Image: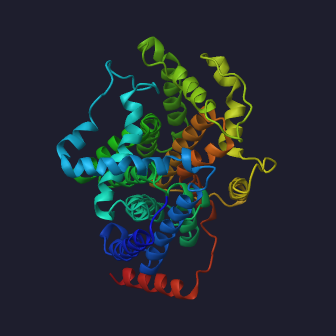
Amino acid sequence: MNLSYQSMELQAIVFIVYVAFFNWLVTRIPFVRNSGLPVNWIIWLFSLKIIAGLVYAWFYSQPAYYATSDTWNFFKASKPETDWLLQDPIAFFKDLFTNGYQSSSNLFTHTNSYWNDLKNNSVIKLLAICNIFTFKNYFADIIFFNFLSFFGPIALYRISHKLLLVNKTLLVISVFLVPSFLFWCSGIHKDGILFSCIALIIFHFQKQLEIQKLHFKSIAVILCCLIAIFALRNFLIFLLLPALIVWFLTYRFRGKEKQIIISIYAIVILFFFLSSKINPRVDLPNYIIEKQAEFKQLSGNSEISIPVLENNFLSFVKFIPTAIDIAFFRPHLTEFRNISYVPASLEVLFIWVFFIFSIFYKNTNKTKHQAAYIYFCLCFSISFLLLCGYTIPFSGAIVRYRAIALPLILTAMLPRFASTKIKLPKLLRSKFFLKEQIDKLK
């Protein structure tokens, strides 16, 4: 962290150049422009992500967090990787697919496992590539990561705006500006990339349903995103697939949504508890217990006292209230350990107030596209959050893991507020109005 004045000056110049370049670039990309957002909104939203990334970097540069922070450790590990890439690019990329352990690794183990190492190695390799263009400038790397993670919110905004026909301002807030989402998905880490992959899968899955035939580009994007998710956080694949099946079936069989959801998740739960009978190496309940134990080994002042979780159905059922509390209500308003807990607690309170108000708003009739999309958002988000509740016994950590699900949950609630009118600032409102009139003329 100790840099000379000349080095800091050079890094500042590189950072400013890339801020200007990528702000120009995002407004020229058709996928972003087709969102319908005004150009100045696109620039401000992208710039806000960069600012959040800088705040993320500052937070983890504090003495209490710097030594153990993943983001700075990723950057340190990426610098020799960049040198290796420049010297021997074939070996650099081959290393990502090389198992350095004597025995084949189990997908669900956390020690001496190629698959577990792949999560961090993928981020380090990506960061090493970015370093070539940024001259190993961490702060310029933030811009590259946010450029990649910006496509996720754009994709979710586009599909939600198209399907749900809700207030644009509320939608922008729900997709881009949820505080924990903005913070955790703007730093150099897995979260922003993961959300982009999930959102792009959602976008192209809906596109497939609309055209009702296989589209090579959409299939390719979905497969690439699934591979990236598998590399970065493999268990998300096992949550995405049932939710996508629910989406497809509820779209095809209107009026049978409850039966479909209950049937799909009954099969999932049955498979979960019988997994060890199918294959002893794939003991999913034990995987959850081990993941929870791994978190318990971490140090932190936000640890939650939880009951013992055992490898049997009854123990998992008894743990449900605890999992719900952790996933949906932590951190409590009464557990302020430091100033960083204040925004997290207020965010939880706001989301629950938003949910309660949505109950009293008129439930408008939905098309089959709208209903199926909302069922997907809720099924994936709730299953993801419950899994986090089972595995994460820290109030501080749950805020980060929960962040990628919040835009999906909030957008699923928005149709309840379809009649709500929120005025935009005059300049932005005029641009929205002008574009709408042009679209009508077309």
Reply above or below: 63 against 421.
above
Q: Which residue occupies the extreme front position in the image?
A: 4
Image quarter of the C terminus: bottom left
- Residue 83: x percent and y percent? 27, 51
Q: Which residue occupies the extreme right position in the image?
A: 334
Q: For residue 176, say whether it is visible.
A: no
Along the line of sight, the residue nearer the viewer: 148 or 200: 148
Residue at 33% across / 23% down in the picture?
A: 101
Along the line of sight, the residue nearer the viewer: 12 or 236: 12
- Residue 314: x percent and y percent? 66, 18
Side (left or right) of 27 relative to 417: left
Along the line of sight, the residue nearer the viewer: 419 or 348: 348
Along the line of sight, the residue nearer the viewer: 217 or 2: 2
Residue at 48% across / 61% down in the picture?
A: 160
Residue 354 found in image quarter: bottom right
Reply above or below: 427 against 145.
below
- Residue 397: x percent and y percent? 62, 43
Label tally: 0
Residue at 48% across / 84% down in the picture?
A: 433
Residue at 41% across / 39% down in the picture?
A: 119
Colouring style = rainbow
Side (left or right) of 259 relative to 322: left
- Residue 85: x percent and y percent? 24, 49
Q: For residue 337, say whether it is visible.
A: yes
